[in-house]
Image: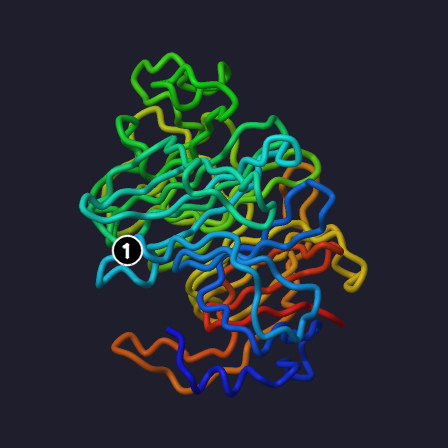
Amino acid sequence: MFRPLLLTLLAAATLAPAADLIQLQRLYPEMETLFPITVQIPNDGSGRQFLALQRGQILILPDDESAKSAPVFLDLSTRAMEAADGKFEEGLNGLAFHPDFKANGKFYLCYTQQQPKRLIVTEMQVSKADPNKADPATERVLLEIPLVNWNHHGGNIVFGPDGFLYIGVGDMSKRNGELRLSETNATLNGKILRIDVNKTDWAGRYSIPADNPFADGKNALPQIYALGIRNPWGLTFDAKGNLWCADVGQDLYEEINWITKGGNYGWSYREGKGTFVLRNEKDPEGSQFIDPIHQYDHATGLSITGGYIYQGKALPDHAGAYIYGDFIIGKIWALRTDDTGKVTSDTLLYTSPQGEPTGPKKKPTVLVKPTAFCPDKNGELLVLDWNGALYRAQK
């Protein structure tokens, strides 16, 4: 969690030991940016960079990277998004701009609410009077998913090249997949969902794409695009249309999947490429689980943070690589694959300075805990840090 001491330590412009292949340059060191979860840039030609914070604010980042404050585009912090025990994962966890945002001013959010506890996917529009302000009065709730725990609800959202909205939803189990929802097609938990926000023939809110794998609703909810997911944190499409999903593991492995229509990724029968040993059950008869394209064990890291395919110029050696990291250990890697998803290289780029382990689980104290990797308006790599900082990667 955020601590004043960490702010002092993070004030240095660069945090990187000599062995690292990249350095992290601190941006906006005088600005409060607690719990950042994504930076999104709408396709409207404005070049505006919208920073979403988990406690419910969306800021427009100033061009002056030494600025002390930022215009507030939207503030939902008064909505009591998180319960007393839910501040680690609950809140605003998803922001996506409509592909035709320039014309329609629509954007989408995914956040939690309490009493009843639920995950909400909603549409909102920009104020007609001020393009730098959202208009909360235009909010239109698309989807509500009941929750019973504060963790493992996911919340990342992204538009695909097909124009549909993809939603990552976690299994909602505290541990061991005890609720058994990822393989249960009567719930939306533990799934990747896909909906059409441009039509409203599903309860007057959205539409089900005709080629969704269960579009007819027989034996499965029609919003489901893929299943067998534990806690997706990081969805992105590459230029070839592959949907990358980083899925947080439990005891042994963290994994990266290429999500295919109707694919089943095995949780909680599988963790990574192997059997999930604590479930102690045979795979269901006829099951065809899809292995991750990449995994790493818990000697390497403890909680994966997904990223995107880097296409900038500042790090030419890593152009075309998938940049991802580990939230607990503070590492960043560049992963390359061939067109089939076979990994050709996995390069460690950066390891955060660490302090003494703290807490009952003795997890390391790290100065950079990546929550997201995003391109800035010039295509350069931004690293968002749970401790309350934003960085730009450089050689």
Residue 301: percent from left, percent from top: 46, 66
Q: In this view, does 282 lie above or below 310?
A: above
Tally the marks: 1
Q: Which of 370 and 61 is in front in this view?
A: 61
Query: On the image, numbered disc 1 is attached to which residue?
Result: 80
Q: Is residue 47 left or right of residue 222?
A: right
Q: What residue type is labelled 1?
A: Ala
Quadrant of the image containing the C terminus: bottom right
Q: Residue at x 32, y 33 (%)?
A: 188
Q: Residue at x 53, y 41 (%)?
A: 127
Residue 389: percent from left, percent from top: 54, 72
Q: In this view, does 262 lie above or below 356?
A: above
Q: Nearer the viewer, residue 67 or 282?
A: 67
Q: Which residue is drawn at 62% across and 50% down?
A: 308
Secondary-structure class at tag 1: loop
Q: Is residue 155 left or right of residue 246?
A: left
Q: In this view, does 193 lie to the left or right of 44?
A: left
